[in-house]
């Protein structure tokens, strides 16, 4: 049996005898793997950009229960109590909203004023982009959407800590008229939520209910004890006539879509990988033809067919692995460079830094292992052929 050190020395002869061809072959394999790495990394990056906006934990255990547009059935205090009595429901957090007029200094504008309890933020996955969200004990604090800043053409540091006033327009039951009710306090702005599409503010629900009667609620967040109870609780709500959405199902659907995108991107990269594999197969075949006489001599002095086969397989696996490592370096290096340049542009333009490309460690390890496997499969035929060569025919070649 051939010694390991001899096998390694013979398998790496290509780097000394044909360095240019060997490294060009490895570079070609690297380009194929690099294409796979950077395309799939783009898929991971896009998936992360979407899902990192979602707060996991309690938000994944809650259902968003909404009154139907027909208003045949509405969410009132009695309904909220009935929600709490549903098996496996831990808590309920309602939201009441009213059309309002906000006044900031000498500026005024229309917005939707949402009355919520502080726990609603956790159940709805709401986080503060600037500042903070109000707590259970705070009564005079409010949180605005970023669209309100655009309405007033202000920056976060110009509006945080300042006070605003509200006039609430309360619909009169049984008619189309509204009652204008000024809130009797000034409210301090303590946080900004990232939402440039909707103009709204969050205010403590107790603050609204202390100044006027809230007959019905627009929606409620229903938190269950475990994720396995989401479907049964959702079915119960739908049977009662309410519309229901779930953050967990949105995340699941998004993951399925992005998994499909990643597979499609990997297929495009796989085309380049196939071209690289063909190039490597060609190199191994040429190497076999060049070393036919050498193989004959090795067989004559006692080398077994298995020794010859292992030598060629070791050479092809090594080339495949080095090609994979080169591809990982190309893909990760290119992706991180693009991330850096995008972040530089985003910061200069006042935007938020982001990572368009992401490379999970498990994916990179898979690429490294797969490159060695590809090298093995590519070298299997030439190595088997080399092991089967007749020694006398090989010497006369």
Image (cartoon, rainbow, N blue to C red):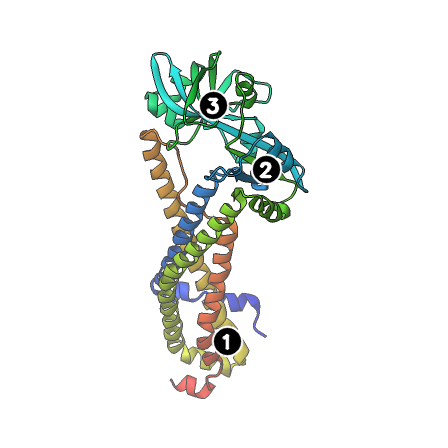
Q: Position of residue 87 (x, y in %)?
A: 68, 42
Q: Secondary structure at mark 1?
A: helix
**Gap between marks 2 and 3, in whole Å?**
22 Å
Mark in the foreground, 1 or 2: 2
Badge 2 marks a residue whose secondary structure is: strand
Left or right, 90 with reference to 201: right
Q: Residue at x 34, y 12 (%)?
A: 106
Mark 2 highlights which residue? Answer: 222
One can see residue 303 in this view: no
Looking at the image, how many numbered discs can be counted on the residues? 3
Q: Nearer the viewer, residue 392 or 362?
A: 362
Q: Nearer the viewer, mark 2 or mark 3?
A: 2
Residue 137 position, x and y percent, is: 60, 19
The residue where tag 3 is placed is 143
Choose mark 1 or mark 3, whichever is in front: 3
Q: Give me the disc on residue 89.
A: none
Query: In the rendered view, does 208 fall on the left or right side of 266?
Result: right
Cα–Cα gap, marks 1 and 2: 65 Å
Q: Dot 3, crowdedness within 10 Å: few (<14), some or many (≥20)? A: many
Quadrant of the snapshot with the C terminus: bottom left
- The structure residue drawn at horizontal position 41% and vertical position 32%, both measured from the top left corner, is 195
Q: Is residue 4 above or below residue 303?
A: above
Residue 344 spot, x, y in % from top left: 34, 34
Q: Which residue is mark 1?
A: 309
Element type at mark 3? strand
- Residues 80 and 304: in front is 80
């Amino acid at each position: 049996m051939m010694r390991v050190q001899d096998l390694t020395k013979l398998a790496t002869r290509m780097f000394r005898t044909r360095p240019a061809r060997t490294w060009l072959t490895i570079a070609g394999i690297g380009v194929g793997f690099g294409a796979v790495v950077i395309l799939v990394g783009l898929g991971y990056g896009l998936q992360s950009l979407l899902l990192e906006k979602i707060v996991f934990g309690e938000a994944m255990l809650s259902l968003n229960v909404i009154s139907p547009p027909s208003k045949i059935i509405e969410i009132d205090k009695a309904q909220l109590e009935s929600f709490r009595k549903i098996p496996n429901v831990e808590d309920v957090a309602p939201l009441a909203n009213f059309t309002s007029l906000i006044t900031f200094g000498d500026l005024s504008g229309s917005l939707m004023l949402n009355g919520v309890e502080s726990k609603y933020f956790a159940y709805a996955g709401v986080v503060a982009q600037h500042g903070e969200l109000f707590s259970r004990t705070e009564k005079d604090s409010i949180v605005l959407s970023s669209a309100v800043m655009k309405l007033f053409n202000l920056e976060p540091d110009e509006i945080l800590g300042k006070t605003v006033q509200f006039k609430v327009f309360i619909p009169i039951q049984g008619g189309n008229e509204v009652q204008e009710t000024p809130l009797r306090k000034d409210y301090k702005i303590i946080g900004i939520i990232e939402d440039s599409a909707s103009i709204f503010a969050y205010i403590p629900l107790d603050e609204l209910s202390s100044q006027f009667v809230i007959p019905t609620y627009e929606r409620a967040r229903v938190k269950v004890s475990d994720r396995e109870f989401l479907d049964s609780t959702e079915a119960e709500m739908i049977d009662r006539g309410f519309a229901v959405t779930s953050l967990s199902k949105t995340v699941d659907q998004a993951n399925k879509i992005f998994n499909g995108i990643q597979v499609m991107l990997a297929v495009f990269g796989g085309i380049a990988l196939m071209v690289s594999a063909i190039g490597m197969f060609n190199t191994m075949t040429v190497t076999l033809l060049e070393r036919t006489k050498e193989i004959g001599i090795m067989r004559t002095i006692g080398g077994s067919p298995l020794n010859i086969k292992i030598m060629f397989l070791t050479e092809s696996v090594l080339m495949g692995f080095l090609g994979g490592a080169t591809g990982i370096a190309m893909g990760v290096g290119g992706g991180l460079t693009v991330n850096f340049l995008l972040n530089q542009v985003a910061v200069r333009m006042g935007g938020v830094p982001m990572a368009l490309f992401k490379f999970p460690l498990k994916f990179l390890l898979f690429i490294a292992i797969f490159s060695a496997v590809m090298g093995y499969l590519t070298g299997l035929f030439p190595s088997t052929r080399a092991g089967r060569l007749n020694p006398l025919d090989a010497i006369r070649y």
